Image (tube, rainbow, N blue to C red):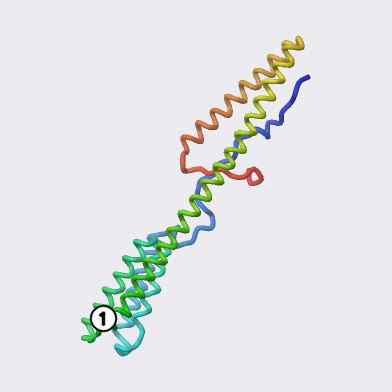
Amino acid sequence: MQTTTSTAAASPVALTPAVPHDELWFRAHPRLALAVVTLLFAGVLALRLSVGEPVDGYSMLFVFPVALAAVAFGARGGLLAGVVGLALVAVWVLARDVDLSVAGWVTRALPLLLLGYLLGRAVDRGQRAEAERRRLEVAAALHREAIEINDSLVQRMSAAKWALEAGRTDSGLEALVEAIGEAHRLVSDLIRRAEMGDHAVVLPRDARP
């Protein structure tokens, strides 16, 4: 008795470049994000220098470029943007000869620095969690594929063995050649994937082309 195995059952899992299609614009285009952050800083500084009184809260508008820098570049970018925002507050103080008290400096510095660092840190942790989730998905898909490959090769070899034992030499040799060819194809695919390295991810079988 000869057992046939569907070729699709042992097909290698499809690969695609590991670039998420729903990536936000400020992560997909960091230079553009940096340009927008710079324009926001410049716009808030111009507003702070041209209108309002020292007691007005225009300086708090620096939270917008700081927040954008944090979500685009993580904790380091957010903290650096907070420092830049604080430096621009100092520029306003010197240019307008404003006398800020210690409390005035603290109430302007803490929101900028804490927002940049804490929001950026949360973004960094979210990205690490997403990378780990994708890694686990790839590992699970490869494990399923390994089981299917093993089943396919065992069935082919078993079919060859049964045919040879039954005296059907031609059928047995044909099944053996098919098993060797299938093993060669699978090994070649694994080598190709190893060369692609981290630039490829495994898609679930229902998402294969």
Q: Position of residue 2 (x, y in %)?
A: 76, 21
* Residue 55 placement: quadrant: bottom left
Vertical relation: 52 (above or below) 135: below
Q: Position of residue 118 (x, y in %)?
A: 40, 66
> Measuring 74% from the left and 26% from the top, which residue is drawn there?
4
> Measuring 67% from the left and 28% from the top, which residue is drawn there?
152
Q: Where does the C terminus fall, quadrant-wise?
A: top right
Q: Position of residue 164 (x, y in %)?
A: 72, 12
Residue bearing mark 1: 92
Neighbour tally class for label 1: few under 14, some 14-19, many 20 plus, Cα within 10 Å: some
Q: Is residue 59 left or right of residue 119?
A: left
Q: Is residue 151 left or right of residue 22?
A: right
Residue 209 visible from this viewpoint = no
Q: Say what amino acid the circle numbered 1 marks.
A: Trp
* Residue 174 placement: quadrant: top right
Residue 25 visible from this viewpoint = yes
Depth check, front residue: 185 or 87: 87
Vertical relation: 155 (above or below) 43: above
Q: Is residue 196 left or right of residue 62?
A: right
Depth check, front residue: 209 or 183: 183
* Residue 96 placement: quadrant: bottom left
Count of marks placed on residues: 1
Mark 1 falls on what kind of element? helix
Direction right: furthest residue: 1
Q: Where does the N terminus fall, quadrant-wise?
A: top right
Q: Position of residue 182 (x, y in %)?
A: 62, 25
> Measuring 50% from the left and 33% from the top, which residue is drawn there?
192
